[in-house]
Image (cartoon, coloured by chain):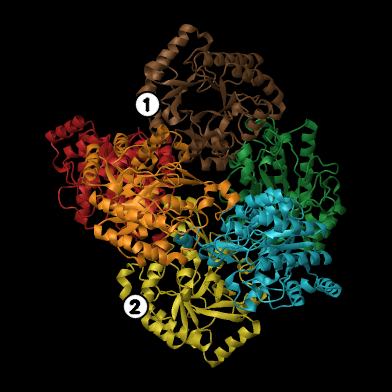
Chain colours: A orange, B cyan, C yellow, D green, E brown, F red
Amino acid sequence: MQLGFVTAILPDYTLEEVLRTAADIGYDCVEAMCWPPGKAERRYAGVTHVDVSRLDEAGIAEVRALQEKYGVFISSLGYYPNPLGGAPESRQAAVDHLHRLIDASAALGINTVTTFVGRDKDRTIEAQWDDFLATWRPLVDHAAEKDVRIGIENCPMRFTADEWPGGNNLAVSPAVWERMWTDIPSPAWGLNYDPSHLVLMQMDYTRPFRDYPERMVHVHAKDLRIDRDKLDRHGVFSHPGQWHTPKLPGLGDVDWGQFFGHLTDAGYHGPVCVEVEDRAYEGSEELRLRSLRQSHDYLRQFIV
Amino acid sequence: MQLGFVTAILPDYTLEEVLRTAADIGYDCVEAMCWPPGKAERRYAGVTHVDVSRLDEAGIAEVRALQEKYGVFISSLGYYPNPLGGAPESRQAAVDHLHRLIDASAALGINTVTTFVGRDKDRTIEAQWDDFLATWRPLVDHAAEKDVRIGIENCPMRFTADEWPGGNNLAVSPAVWERMWTDIPSPAWGLNYDPSHLVLMQMDYTRPFRDYPERMVHVHAKDLRIDRDKLDRHGVFSHPGQWHTPKLPGLGDVDWGQFFGHLTDAGYHGPVCVEVEDRAYEGSEELRLRSLRQSHDYLRQFIV
Amino acid sequence: MQLGFVTAILPDYTLEEVLRTAADIGYDCVEAMCWPPGKAERRYAGVTHVDVSRLDEAGIAEVRALQEKYGVFISSLGYYPNPLGGAPESRQAAVDHLHRLIDASAALGINTVTTFVGRDKDRTIEAQWDDFLATWRPLVDHAAEKDVRIGIENCPMRFTADEWPGGNNLAVSPAVWERMWTDIPSPAWGLNYDPSHLVLMQMDYTRPFRDYPERMVHVHAKDLRIDRDKLDRHGVFSHPGQWHTPKLPGLGDVDWGQFFGHLTDAGYHGPVCVEVEDRAYEGSEELRLRSLRQSHDYLRQFIV
Amino acid sequence: MQLGFVTAILPDYTLEEVLRTAADIGYDCVEAMCWPPGKAERRYAGVTHVDVSRLDEAGIAEVRALQEKYGVFISSLGYYPNPLGGAPESRQAAVDHLHRLIDASAALGINTVTTFVGRDKDRTIEAQWDDFLATWRPLVDHAAEKDVRIGIENCPMRFTADEWPGGNNLAVSPAVWERMWTDIPSPAWGLNYDPSHLVLMQMDYTRPFRDYPERMVHVHAKDLRIDRDKLDRHGVFSHPGQWHTPKLPGLGDVDWGQFFGHLTDAGYHGPVCVEVEDRAYEGSEELRLRSLRQSHDYLRQFIV
Amino acid sequence: MQLGFVTAILPDYTLEEVLRTAADIGYDCVEAMCWPPGKAERRYAGVTHVDVSRLDEAGIAEVRALQEKYGVFISSLGYYPNPLGGAPESRQAAVDHLHRLIDASAALGINTVTTFVGRDKDRTIEAQWDDFLATWRPLVDHAAEKDVRIGIENCPMRFTADEWPGGNNLAVSPAVWERMWTDIPSPAWGLNYDPSHLVLMQMDYTRPFRDYPERMVHVHAKDLRIDRDKLDRHGVFSHPGQWHTPKLPGLGDVDWGQFFGHLTDAGYHGPVCVEVEDRAYEGSEELRLRSLRQSHDYLRQFIV
Amino acid sequence: MQLGFVTAILPDYTLEEVLRTAADIGYDCVEAMCWPPGKAERRYAGVTHVDVSRLDEAGIAEVRALQEKYGVFISSLGYYPNPLGGAPESRQAAVDHLHRLIDASAALGINTVTTFVGRDKDRTIEAQWDDFLATWRPLVDHAAEKDVRIGIENCPMRFTADEWPGGNNLAVSPAVWERMWTDIPSPAWGLNYDPSHLVLMQMDYTRPFRDYPERMVHVHAKDLRIDRDKLDRHGVFSHPGQWHTPKLPGLGDVDWGQFFGHLTDAGYHGPVCVEVEDRAYEGSEELRLRSLRQSHDYLRQFIV
C-alpha cells in the first residue's frame, strides 16, 4: 500500500507545492483534484491541481516530471460532481468533464479516476435507476477502453438541509453496489472506499473488503465520531450533520487496526489517501499542514 | 399504571367483543380506534371501535355501560391520520375528525386523544413549521377548552418507499418536541410515547421520561429488533423497513425492565397499551389473540 | 408453539405419571424417551417411557388414550445413541432401534423422531463421512416413506475426557449441516435445535433459524453459562465440562427473548421442549419437579 | 429457596396483617422487623413486628400460631442498628437488643438473626478493628450457643451527607468479610447478602456466592440503577445518593437470571426476601402493596 | 497544542538539565515544579526547578535564556500543596507561596500557574465552602490583576489511608467546578485537566471538554487502569490505591484518540504535559527517562 | 524490554544478513532459529540461523562478533519440535537437539532456549503426563546445570486437520502450566509467552503476567483476529484454522496497550520478539521485510 492525501485540503497550492509538501511530510502519493477551473460550489469542491480541460503534451510531460522530481506519484485524478442531479446542463458538464478525466488519467499513466455517481436527491434510487444506467454505461465503457478504472466514493453526500432528502450520490451501500455491478458488470469500475461513511450509517465497515476485494479501486482514510448526546436529540433520520463530527484518522470511531487487518487480508496493495474534513484543523494553512503531518504519522503505523 | 392494548389488532370485533377479550385476558384498558367509518388506507388504519362521527347520548351511555360491564376502561380515543400531508381535503377531513375525537373524549369522560401531528413528507420540518403551527394551535386550544389532553405518538411513519422521504409524522425527536412545546406551550398536549421508535432511530429511549415527565400523556408498548446483517447491507438512510422487524414486547431490543424503571421514577401512573405489529402474530385471529395474551403476561411482570 | 419437556428427567415415572405431571404443571406436550429397556450407559440416557420394541396395537391405543386423558401430546419419540461410534454390534443395535422408533412414531401419529447422528469420536468428520452417509441414507429414506421427520440434535457430546476428542455426535455446526443436507437432501430430516450448544461453541444461536427455517423439526430449551474464570484457566480446546455449567432456561447465557423473536419470525410453530441438565436441580424428585415448574413458568412468557 | 419480603415496608401493620398480606400475594416467608418499640431514627428503621423485648411464652405461642395460620414462616428476625457508632449508650443498647434477638430467634425456632455490624463512620476500618472484635466476639459466641446464625447485611450505609464519610456498617466487601471470618471464624455468622450494594460499588455481585457459599445465611432481593449522567457529574467518591436510584427487582441493573444461576449452583436453599426501597412505590399503602405484588411475580420466575 | 512533561519526575536535575532532556527527546515544553526549597512531604512533591522564593531580575533572565537556548518553553509554574487542610501555618504558607508563583509566572511571561485548591479532608465539601471561598477569592483576584490564569488539577488526592476520607483537593467533579465558577466567576481560573482522575471515579472524561472549553487552562496526560479483580474485592468506597494502577499514556484505560478528538473540537491549543506516576518506570533514572521517551512517542501520534 | 523478531521469517538469510536487517530497521535483538540443518517439516519450521550441531570455538566467536558488529543481540536460541509425539526416533532426535541448544546457549552467553514441550496429539494430556515428565525432567535439569532458562511457547499447535485432535504442544493453559511447575518446580523453565494463543482460546491474556511473573522467560508478539462469521459456521471445537487469521501486531484482537501495561507492572524487562505469521505479508521478501518494519514501528510506541 501507499500512503497519500487528497489535495483538496491545499486549494491554494500549485501542483508542485502540493507534491513538495507531500514529499516533505513523507507521503508516497496524492489524489489530485481536477475540478474544472472556476468557483467552488461547495466546501472541499472546486479545486484544480491538474487542469484536465487543457492538458496537452507539454502539460503531461510537466506533471510526469513533477512526480519524478519529488518522488511522489499521483494515485488518481479526483473530481466529485453530481452527474445525476441538478440542471441538465450541469449534469452534462459533469459527464463531459469526467470523460476528460478518463482521457487525462490514461494519458498520464495514472489509470485511475475517483468520483461520485451522483444522484437526483429528490427521487428514490429505484425511481432514477434507468437514468443512472443511461449516464454511467458510456462512462464505464469509455474507462474500459482507455484501461482506466473508476473508483466511486461511497459517500452519501447527505449531511445538511440543502442535500435533503436523498443526498447527491447514490452509491452508498452493498445493496446498491451489487445492483450497479449486476447491471454494469465491467471490471473497469469499483469503489473509492471510505470507511467513515459506513460508521455514519451504522454499518460494518470491514465487511466490504471481505465481500468485494476486486472492486476496491482506491481507499480514502477519513474518520468521524458519532456524537451520542446529539444523536439522542435528533435520531438517524434527521440531517446527520447534527450528530456526527468528521475527524482526522485516529481521532474518531474507526478502529484502524481492524480496518487495515481486513484490507491486507483482502490483498489490497493500492493507495490509501487521507481526506481531511476535520473542522478543528481547517482554520489556517498551518493547521491544515499539521493535519497532514499528524494523519501521516498516525497511519504510518499501519502502512510501512 | 394500567395495562391495555391498542384495538387496531382486532379490526373485525365490535367494541363489546374487544372489551370482553380484554377482560378475559386480564387487561385493564384499551386504546379504542376511532377512524371514520370506511376503507382503511394502510395497514393498522381504518378501524372504528367507537364511531365518534355519530356519537349521541345513547351512544355515550352505551360505551360507558360496556366499560363498566367488563371492568375495562378506555384509556384514549385513537386515530392516526396525516393532518399535514396529502390532498387539502384529506388534511381538512383529518383535522375535522380530530375535533370530533376531542369532543367525544370529553363527553365520554376519557379526556385523552392519541394521534399523529402528520407531516408533508416532501418537505423538511423547517419548511413546513408555519403550516404545522397553523394546523395544530386550534386543535390544542380546543383540547384545552374541553379538558382533554392530546398524546402525539413519536412514530416517524417512514418505513417504506411510499413514505419516503420525510415520513408522515414530524414529531419524532426531542429536538422537534421541544420546538413544538416552545411554540404551543399548552399543557393540553404531550406524547403518546413509544420506545420502539427510538430504538429504530438509534436513540436513548429512557431519556425522554427523565427530561419531560409532564409531557407523557399515554404510552405504547411495542418492541422491535434491528437486524444487523440487513443494516450492514443498507445503512440507516435507506428505507428502514429493510433492516428492522417489529416484535411483541420482550422479543426485541427494548430492555423493558430499564424502561419501566425510568417510567416509574418519572411518576408515570397512566396507561401502557400494547401495540401489536409483529407479522409473526398476524396470520390468523388465533395468532392475534395469542399475541395479546403473550404481551399481557410478559408486561405484567412490570405492571401489577 | 407448544411448550413441553424431555421426559429423561423423570426416569422412574411411568408414561402416565409423566403425562399427569405435565398436565398438572401446564405443559402442552412431552418428548418421550424411548431407549431400549435396560441399563443406562450414561447420565440422561436409558430412559424408556414408550417401549417401541414391543409396541402392538394395544400399546398404541393405550399411548393414544393416555395423551387424550391428560390433554398432553407426545411431540416426538426421543433416543440419543451413537450409531457411528463404538462396537459394530452396538452401532447396529442403535440403527435397528432407530428404525423401530420411526415405525412407532408413524403408527402413533406423532411423525417425529429426535436423536443424534452419532460419531466415531476418534476420527475427523472428513474421515468418516462415507460411513456417515452409508448409515444415514437408509434411515432417512425409511423416515420419508413413513412420513416421519427426524430431528438431529446439534449437541457436540464432547464434554468430558471419555468423550474426547471428537465427541459422539458430528452434527454440530452449519458447515456440517449443510454438507449433510447436500448429500442427503431429503426433507424428511432436519434439526432438533438446542441453542445452548451454540453458546458453548461461541456461535450465534439465532442465525440457524434465519438460515434454515425449513429444517427446524423440533426445539430443545436448555440454557448454560460460560464460566469465564474457569475458561481463563483451561481454554476452549480443553474438556468443556471444565468451563461451563448447564442451567435451567433463564439462568444462563441464552437471551430467550431474542431467541423466540427469531424463532417466531422463522414461522416456527412446533414444540419447544425443556431439557433439564442443571445439576442444582437434580438432587431429588422434589427438585426435579421444581425445575419443570420453574422452566415452564419462565418460558410461558414467550409461548402463550 | 423460599420467597419472602422484609416487613419494614409495612410499618403500620400488625404481624398478623403482615402475614396475611404475604399469604394473599403468595409469599412463603417474611423477615420480621424487630426494632425496639419507639420512634424510628431513619427511613426504613424503627419497625417492630415482633417485640423481642417482651416476648414471653404466650407471645412465642402466638407468633408460632400466626405463622401456621397463614402458612407463612418468619425467615429471620431483623434489626439494623449501628453497634459500633454513635454514643456509647446507644451502641450498648444495640448490642443488648441484638442479644435479645438471638434469644428470641432461638425460642421461636427461627434460628436466624439479620443485622449490621455497624461502624464508627469517622474512622477507617483498620482503626476500629479492635473495637469491632470486642463487640462482635461475644455476640457471635452467644449465637453459636443458641444455635442461631447471624446474617450481616453487606450494605455500606453510606448514601448521604449525614452518613459521610465511612457509613454505618463496615461489612461491605470480600476483603473485609475475609478478615472478619479469619478473626472470628465461628460458622454461626455469615452474610445477609444483597447484590444491589455490589452494583453500587461497581463490583461483581455473583462472585461471593462462588467464593463463600457456606457463609450465605440469608439473601435480600433489592435492585438499583446507576444513573450514568449523574455519576458523570459527581464521581464515585461523592455521596452515592446523588447518582443511583434504588428500584424493585427487575427494574434496575441486577441481572437476576445470572444471579439466581450462581445462587442455585452454590447450593443455596434458604430464603430470598424482597427489600423495597424504591421511592416510586412508597407514596401510599396501595403503592407499597403493589411493589410487593410486582416483586413477587417478577422473582417467582426464578423461585418456584 | 504543545507536548510537554511535568518536571517532578526528574527531581534531581537542574532546570537546565530538564530543558536539555526535553529538547533531546523532542518535547515542546515542560511544567516546571516550583515547590518551596526543602524536604518533600509526599511522593512527587517537593521538587524545585524554578525557585520562585528568590527570583530576581537575574534569575528571570536566566530562566528565559535557558528556554531559548533549548527551544523548550515553560508551559506553567506548578505547585500542588493543600491550602485548605492541615495546620493553619502550613495553609498560610501554601497561600503565600501561591502568590509568589503568580508573581513569578507573570514576571517570566508564562502567565499560567497550576495547583490544587486543597481540602480539609475531614469535612464535607459543603461544610468548608466558606473557607474555600475566603482562601481562593484573593488568589484568583491576584492572578487576574497579574494577567495570569490558574489551572486547578482535578485530582481527588484520595488514594490511601492517610488521605482518607475526603482527600486533599476538592475540585474533583463538574458539580463542584460549577459551584466554584458560580461563586468566583473570574475567567482567571479554570482547570489543569487530567482525564485519568475521571477514569478512576467512573466518569466520562470527554464531557468536560465539551461543557467548559473556556475553562481548560492546561492539560495533564496521565493514564491509569482499573484493576477489576481488585475492585471486586474492595469496592469503590475503599482506598482507591487498592484497585487501580497509574500507567504511562497508552498503557491504561484512557482512549487517547477519543480524548484528543474532543480536545481538538473544543478548540484547545494549549500545552499537554505528561505526568509520570507509573511505578513500573520509577525504579531508576534510566527508567524515568525511558518513560518520558515512550510517552512522548506515544502522544506524538495525536500532537504533531 | 528489548524489541526483537523471530528469525524464521527470513529463512534464506545468513545470520549476518538477519542481524544487519534487524539493525537497519532498529530492532534490539532476534530470537535465532536453530533447527537441525535439513528440510523443513512444516511452515515456519526448519530454519537454521545458528547451527548448534557443529558450534565450535570459532563458531561461538563468530556469533558473538556478529552481534557486536551490528549492535543486535540474540535473545534466545529457538527450536520448536515435538519431543512427545511422532516416531520414537524423531522424538529422541528432538530431545538430543534440545540438549545441544542448551549447551550452545550457555556457551554463547545467551542462557535462554525457547521451544515447545510437544505432545502426543492422539492422547489426552492426562494420559501422557508420565511420558511428559520422563522426557522433560532431564532437559530442565540440564538447563539448570548450565544456568540456562527454557521458555516454553504456549501454542496449541492445533490449527488444521493434520494436527487434530490434540495438537503438538500440551503447554497451553494455566491449568497445565501449574501442573508442570508443581511436578518439575525448577526455576530453570517457564514460558515463551505469546498472547495471541489465548485470544484464540477465548482466554484473558493479561492474567498470566499477573499470576506467574517469575515464569515469564521470553515473550512473542503475534496478533490474530477471530473471524466471527466463520466461527458462527464452525464453532470452537472445529479446526481453528477455519475461523481465525494470524496478523501483525496491531492488526488483530490483542489490545497491546493493555498487554504492555500488565507486562510492565509484572516487572518484565526481557525481550519481546515479533513473530510474523500473517499470510498477507508472506508473499515476497519485500513484504516480509515490510512486516518487520511495520511491526517494529507499531510496537515501538510501547517499548522505547
**Residue ID for mark 1:** E26
Marks 2 and 1 close (CB-CB < 8 Å): no
**Residue D211 in picture, x, y percent from top left:** 56, 48
Give left or right: position of D186 versus A84.
right
Q: CA distance from mark 2 to mark 1?
A: 70 Å
Pointer 2 indicates a residue of which chain?
C
Q: Nearer the viewer, mark 2 or mark 1?
A: 1
Which mark is on residue C133?
2
**Residue at 52% of width from left, 72% of height from top?**
C266
Q: Amino acid at mark 1?
A: Gly
Q: Do the dots labelled 2 and 1 sit on one chain? A: no
Q: Amino acid at mark 2?
A: Leu
Mark 1 lies on a secondary structure that is loop
Query: Where is residue E193, by image quadrant?
Result: top right
**Residue C271 in picture, x, y percent from top left:** 56, 75
Outermost residue, right side: D58
Q: Quadrant of the N terminus of chain D?
A: bottom right
Q: Is residue C237 visible?
A: no
Query: Where is residue E12, by image quadrant?
Result: top left
Outermost residue, bottom side: C57
For the residue carrying disc 2, how many other residues have a C-alpha within 10 Å: few (<14), some (14-19), or many (20+)? Answer: some
